[in-house]
Image: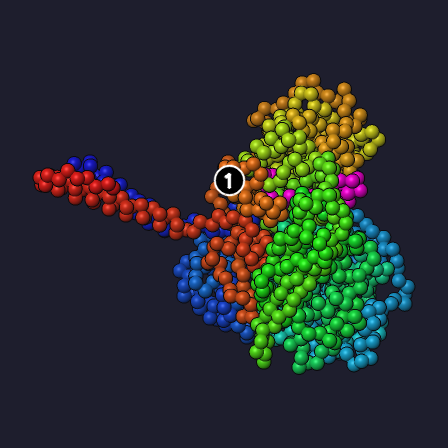
Amino acid sequence: MIASSSISFIAIFLPIFISIYLFQFKPSSDHTLTPNYSTFDPSPFNNLTHGNQVLRKQNYIVRFLHYRKAKDHRFYLESHVRSGGWEWIQRRNPASKYPTDFGLVSIEDSVRGELIEEIEELELVKDVNVDASHVRGLLTEDGGRVGAFVDGKKRPGKIFTSMSFKEGGGEHYTAITNASNRWGRHLSMERSQVTSLFGADSLWAKGYTGSKVKMAIFDTGIRANHPHFRNIKERTNWTNEDTLNDNLGHGTFVAGVIAGGDEECLGFAPDTEIYAFRVFTDAQVSYTSWFLDAFNYAIATNMDVLNLSIGGPDYLDLPFVEKIWEITANNIIMVSAIGNDGPLYGTLNNPADQSDVIGVGGIDYNDHIASFSSRGMTTWEMPHGYGRVKPDVVAYGREIMGSKISTGCKSLSGTSVASPVVAGVVCLLVSVIPESQRKVILNPASMKQALVEGAAKLAGPNMYEQGAGRVDLLESYEVLKSYQPRASIFPGVLDYTDCPYTWPFCRQPLYAGAMPIIFNATILNGMGVIGYVEGQPTWHPSDEEGNLLSIHFTYSKVIWPWTGYIALHMQIKEEGAQFSGEIEGNVTLTVYSPPSRGEKNRRISTCVLQLKLKVVPTPPRSKRILWDQFHNIKYPPGYIPRDSLDVRNDILDWHGDHLHTNFHIMFNMLRDAGYYVETLGSPLTCFDARQYGTLLLVDLEDEYFKEEIEKLRDDVMTTGLGLAVFSEWYNVETMVKMRFFDDNTRSWWTPVTGGANIPALNDLLAPFGIAFGDKILNGDFSIDGEQSRYASGTDIVRFPQGGYMHSFPFVDSSESGAAQSILTSSMSKADFPILGLLEAGEGRIAVYGDSNCLDSSHMVTNCYWLLRKILDFTSANIRDPILFTKFSKRNSPLYLEDSKLPSRRSDVNFSLYSAVARKELICRSDSRFEVWGTKGYSIQVRGRNRRLPGFPVIDLGRGLNSTSEGSSMGPPKSSSKDRSDTYGNRYLSLFYRDEPDMPLIVPNHWLVPAVVALTGLFLLLSFWRIRQKRRRRRRGSGSARFSNI
């Protein structure tokens, strides 16, 4: 009886005890880039000594939901945070007299996770983020640029691309490409005034000189009483240095381009009121908190225009990005440099890549895109969507004259120069509008409309290089003279006959049966900071043939601040399989905004996007190639290392790995060879293999669903699909050596995977008996006279009998323990198999261990010739006699046991960055319309989330929590308490504030204990009812009834 009572007691109260335990010890929400921390701290700052113990501290930004005085925020935290280990940091700067939406606190590392969680749980707190530092590239003595990484090591500060530029002409060395470019033209000593090239003197003659325009220059400051400037209104210092002066010359130069008065280096708007915000130290270091305070001050003091000549790849620095939204929402026109990472594609810098910011690229005096100018498209939308057109406009950015620190002029080059050229143009245009009407007519959208509609389109560059074209001051002036608030779409025309401007669209016509072609345009709403789309976008064909085009739309239903997006997903209907010709028509979209002050009726405008498309009959299967974009992972948010380990100053893989970014040259080559290339941004279950000759897998980092592996096996063996795989290096020892401590996030950054995810690729290729190894091979080789460089590629360690395999002598840097490939005479070479070709059932497979020869980012030599031979084989069974010789045919299988194959890392939470691990298999809006929202072709079973071995419970990552807040002029604010928005907004919805385009796995901390508690109560009630019935039986009630429990 006692034992029975004890068991009953345990059964009843154990769930309650567990519930209390779970409530008390909630899972940590410590969001960092990787969960791999170390107690060792190489950073010397913020270390305090307490007895014999060193307390390491770091500054964090606490963002609040409302603007209050700093002392009120401090009182709120001190009243509600019960834990110790933190202190409020008093910020003494000009913004301290105004309300603020954030506070700066110092937190001890030992209590960081628990304390941040406690602060974030407070009702009025939005989120907590590390106070990241911004480091601009420095000018070296020889004029070279220094970026975030030098010789493979990370410099202090936030990861920013090189922003410096070389004085004068000569050779320009880029830290990204390790290449030099000789300027094609040198100006004489009598240099042309850049203002005269834009016709600024015409507006000066009309009396427009930038008068009463408040220009905020965020840079390195300016010296007082500089002889070149008429109207320096205010100089403010936001750094930890006790000076207002510019000791580097960059801020002075930028101000000179905008408003200089010296005859040798005239600025565009000499009467503009200059407000110099010194946000960089003499070492060109800044912190996010400095920027946030300075931005708040710019809002409070009603700046008109703001120039920001910095940028970097991290568009997930939310405090910074969201403050930019707030700046523009408060009607400040922001101009920013697009970046100096050209001529590479997919290298746009933030914040210039934001749609509400005027992003500026650079050209030379011959109207050629400057080699240093970064190229589009934007990569926020990858891998599921398609990037937007950026830059917005281009301006002269080579050998521009500007002011020196004290007196005199000099010339500099870079997009940091092109940006103030456009900022000066904007100041001049603002002064054209009467002061009483400026805030009514002018805003970030209307100014961008004037610039892009007035721009002169250049012959030669495509729209992802030049945007709308070269700024034309006088044409934009004409636009503004008669401007009425309206909405528009940029670009307003997609014309397949306008090549090369509409590249890549004009390079490949539409045809029936293809994956949707996605065109992503920007909605500019000059009617108000917030707007709404009324009804649905509509396609209006010009003739009956236009009905063969089917368009699905995804778009911003709420447009804020000032901008939104509309994406066209275009397919030719099956009845157009034999149609050849052009389809023309318009897409219309109606936008409305609330009435402005003094108005009764809402503002409404209809936007028009003109289409002129080329259509051809559906090509034969052997000419159709499908590119897998879905399994690509890039930075941000994960530390994805560069494919070539020889590149020491650009170690992050952040260019998008898309056909139209760093693989754009390969795309052009395939089109020239007669192939039609389509993109798949959904799982491999979402395409019909009968339509394609080859599936092309290049440099992929993600995992694969079980259903994908099974379908691909059947597609190749039964359906006859060709498979071409270009792999990359994967070596755990090397990945460990690439680990570095980031002083911003106070955490160790560890590569999520290698150049490619070899363990995942080996799973995919296992049904065919193929596997890659973990060697890192380097060297030169030739096939049939074609010279190639094998750069940090891997080897093949499994291959079936009867296939054809090619081996070459290479240096294996993985054995030497090197973290990069350094070829020396002391390192011996050995033969390694790197190329394999195989017939598998009805299909054919080709595998190659390196993709750098296809990637234009850091290519030494290309292997397009090899790609063509491979595609001839996989798509049409055309066998090149050099590749298919009796000497290369394997008479026995190549086999390496499972225990020696590359294995997954168990110390990295891969699900943070993966679209597969712990996600649902689903076909998205970049697949054929008929499978949208399904699991794909021939998939009858329900999808499942795949869990990788050794991974802990999902951690959403500190610093990546998504919120959507702007100024009081914006839409309703959402706080970080809304955890359902956390994951999706890190990608597409982060920028557009729409519903996330991926499933959410966000368990709340109360869910599990609540379920356990309810279970305990249910058991308690059940045992009580059983005991009552037993008592009735013992009393001889004679009842034989039993209740169903």
Picture coordinates of residue 743 (x, y %)? 59, 53
Q: Would you identify the image quadrant in which residue 436 lies?
A: bottom right
The answer to whether residue 843 is above or below residue 61 is above
Q: Is residue 943 left or right of residue 311?
A: left
Q: Residue at x 68, y 50 (%)?
A: 548
Please name the amino acid that badge 1 sits on.
Gly
Residue identifier under label 1: 943
Q: Residues within 10 Å of mark 1 (few under 14, many from 20)?
A: some
Residue 891 shows up from this direction: yes
Q: Residue at x 76, y 47 (%)?
A: 580
Task: Assess whether residue 905 is covered by the magenta stretch.
Answer: no
Extreme residue toward the left, this view: 1036
Task: Assess whether residue 680 is covered by the magenta stretch.
Answer: yes
Picture coordinates of residue 766 (x, y %)? 60, 29
Residue 290 shows up from this direction: no
Q: Would you identify the image quadrant in which residue 922 lies?
A: top right
Query: Of residues 436 and 253, which is closer to you in this image?
Result: 436
Extreme residue toward the front, this view: 544
Q: Is residue 95 left or right of residue 192?
A: left
SS at mark 1?
loop
Highlighted magenta segment, given as a residue range: 662-685
Q: Residue at x 59, y 79 (%)?
A: 599
Picture coordinates of residue 47 (x, y %)? 53, 55
Picture coordinates of residue 649 (x, y %)? 71, 47
The answer to whether residue 908 is above or below residue 884 is below
Query: How many numbered dots are placed on residues in this image?
Result: 1
Q: Would you identify the image quadrant in which residue 938 lies?
A: top right
Query: Of residues 672 and 166, which is closer to you in this image?
Result: 672
Q: Residue at x 67, y 77 (%)?
A: 438
